[in-house]
Image (spheres, rainbow, N blue to C red):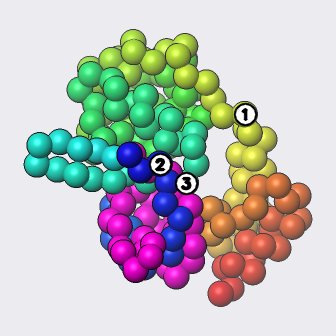
């Protein structure tokens, strides 16, 4: 089984990327393909989805995303093609919090997730998964997003550079890094 791949992003589509490693291009389905920069190297954690007529790779930027994805696809009626969009539009901690609080409204906002599946997710996963330890980083990103929005940048442009910002930096350094990336 493949655990991760480290390579250069060569192509992006609406739901997958092509990552090149040793002159082999791997098609990997990811939550946000455009959060990856072309011609840059990334380490992507993988899930191998093997069925009778299908062999697919699903990729994640963090181990926490992969672990949540693995928990979600074990829910009855929820497959990889339904779980991946949840990670695209929601944060790991937000999804975990919604499950723990039994927030059906939050879960049904995701594509193809109806009330029945939302209830099944809560039934199967409530209390069994924990939120990632680094919730302070999300707060600092909220502050960063607020500053960049006040400077006149669009949310779509801001979200493209967020994955490339080092969360260990203080807010001033994050702003400088974001501005540098926006001006490229």
Counting from the top left corner in percent of width and height, residue 8 is at 50, 75
Report which quarter residue 49 is drawn in.
top left
The CA span between labels 3 and 2 is: 12 Å
Which of disc 1 and disc 2 is earlier in sequence? 2
Residue matched to label 2: 3
Q: Nearer the viewer, residue 30 or 53?
A: 53
- Position of residue 177 in the picture relative to residue 76 (left or right): right
- Position of residue 100 in the picture relative to residue 19 (left or right): right
The residue lying at 76 percent from left, 61 percent from top is 166
The CA span between labels 2 and 1 is: 22 Å
Counting from the top left corner in percent of width and height, residue 158 is at 62, 67
Report which quarter residue 113 is drawn in.
top left
Q: Is residue 167 above or below residue 119?
A: below
Labels 2 & 1 near each other (Cβ < 8 A): no
Counting from the top left corner in percent of width and height, residue 153 is at 65, 73
Say how many tags the image has: 3
Which of discs 2 and 1 lies nearer the camera? The answer is: 2
Labels 3 & 2 near each other (Cβ < 8 A): no
**Stretch in magenta:** 19-47
Which of discs 3 and 2 lies nearer the camera? The answer is: 2
- Magenta span has 46? yes
Q: Is residue 124 above or below residue 53?
A: above
Disc 1 secondary structure class: loop
The CA span between labels 1 and 3 is: 16 Å
Q: Residues within 10 Å of mark 1 (few under 14, many from 20)?
A: few
Q: Which mark is residue 133?
A: 1
Counting from the top left corner in percent of width and height, residue 52 is at 11, 43
Q: Nearer the viewer, residue 162 or 151?
A: 162
Disc 3 secondary structure class: loop
Q: Residues within 10 Å of mark 2 (few under 14, many from 20)?
A: few
Residue matched to label 3: 61
């Amino acid at each position: 089984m493949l655990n991760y791949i480290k390579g250069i992003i060569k192509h992006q589509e609406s739901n997958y990327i092509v990552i090149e490693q040793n002159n082999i291009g791997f098609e990997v389905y990811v939550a946000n393909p455009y959060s990856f920069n072309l011609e840059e190297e990334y380490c992507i954690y993988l899930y191998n989805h093997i069925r009778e007529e299908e062999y697919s790779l699903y990729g994640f930027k963090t181990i926490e995303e992969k672990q949540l994805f693995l928990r979600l696809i074990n829910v009855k009626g929820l497959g990889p093609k339904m779980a991946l969009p949840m990670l695209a539009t929601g944060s790991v901690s937000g999804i975990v919090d919604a499950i723990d609080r039994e927030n059906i409204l939050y879960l049904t906002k995701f594509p193809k997730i109806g009330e029945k599946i939302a209830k099944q997710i809560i039934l199967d996963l409530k209390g069994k998964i924990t939120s990632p330890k680094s919730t302070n980083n999300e707060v600092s990103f909220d502050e960063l997003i607020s500053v960049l929005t006040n400077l006149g940048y669009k949310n779509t442009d801001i979200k493209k550079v967020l994955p490339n910002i080092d969360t260990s930096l203080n807010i001033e350094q994050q702003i400088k890094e974001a501005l540098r990336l926006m001006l490229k």
